[in-house]
Image (tube, rainbow, N blue to C red):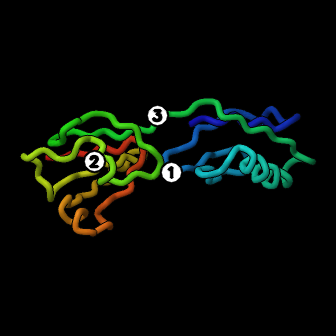
């Protein structure tokens, strides 16, 4: 998602910022701000408060420019592999269910979720039967861009 932040009479502080997968944006002078879950009005108030240290009576407008695709990618032994839209805070089990479930040949105890954060790649291993039995620690909350591999 991309936001346009305009600070009245401060063009050098205004501009477009991209919301990172971790829900933060980086803005001039203020650095990082967690924006995930905020409305544009709430973000405007936070920014006006932060910029009071740098400018007199900052008047800020925040506009949503673009919404990035929120997809996860599912490959391997599922009934419907491919890119699936991520609907809010969805877990591994929810996405596997929307993909039609596991095929009969799936390695149920070795489902991998690969997550890229910059150059760092984190791998999670989940046991489908464990999740079904109530081990919710293995029912990983997914993020846009995650790759789910069901061998």
The reply, left or right, for residue 58 in relation to residue 114 is: right
- Mark 1 in CB contact with mark 3 (< 8 angstroms): no
Q: Position of residue 102 (x, y in %)?
A: 17, 47
**Which of pointers 2 and 3 indicates the residue nearer the eye?**
2
**Compared with residue 23, is residue 134 higher up or lower down, i.e. above or below?**
below
Compare marks 1 and 3 and give the one earlier in the sequence: 1
The reply, left or right, for residue 1 in relation to residue 54 is: left
Displayed quadrant of residue 141: bottom left
Report the residue marked by disc 2: 97
Task: Identify which residue, 140 or 119, lies in the foreground.
Answer: 140
Report the residue marked by disc 1: 22
CA neighbours of label 2 inside 10 A, class few (<14), some (14 to 19), many (20+): few
The reply, left or right, for residue 10 in relation to residue 130 is: right
Q: Is residue 78 visible?
A: yes
Displayed quadrant of residue 108: bottom left
Disc 1 element: loop
Label 2, label 3: how many angstroms apart (C-alpha)? 20 Å
**Compared with residue 130, is residue 56 higher up or lower down, i.e. above or below?**
above
Report the residue marked by disc 3: 69
């Amino acid at each position: 998602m991309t936001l346009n932040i305009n600070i009245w009479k401060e063009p050098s502080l205004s501009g477009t910022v991209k919301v990172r997968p971790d829900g933060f944006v980086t803005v001039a002078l203020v650095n990082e701000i967690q924006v995930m879950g905020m409305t544009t009005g709430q973000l405007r108030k936070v920014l006006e408060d932060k910029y009071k240290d740098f400018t007199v009576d900052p008047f800020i407008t925040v506009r949503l420019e673009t919404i990035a695709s929120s997809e996860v990618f599912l490959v391997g032994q599922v009934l419907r592999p491919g890119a699936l839209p991520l609907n809010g805070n969805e877990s591994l089990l929810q996405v596997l269910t929307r993909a039609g479930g596991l095929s009969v040949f799936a390695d149920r105890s070795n489902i991998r979720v690969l997550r890229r954060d910059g150059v760092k790649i984190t791998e999670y291993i989940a046991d489908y039967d464990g999740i079904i039995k109530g081990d919710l620690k293995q029912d990983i909350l997914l993020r846009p861009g995650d790759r789910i591999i069901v061998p």
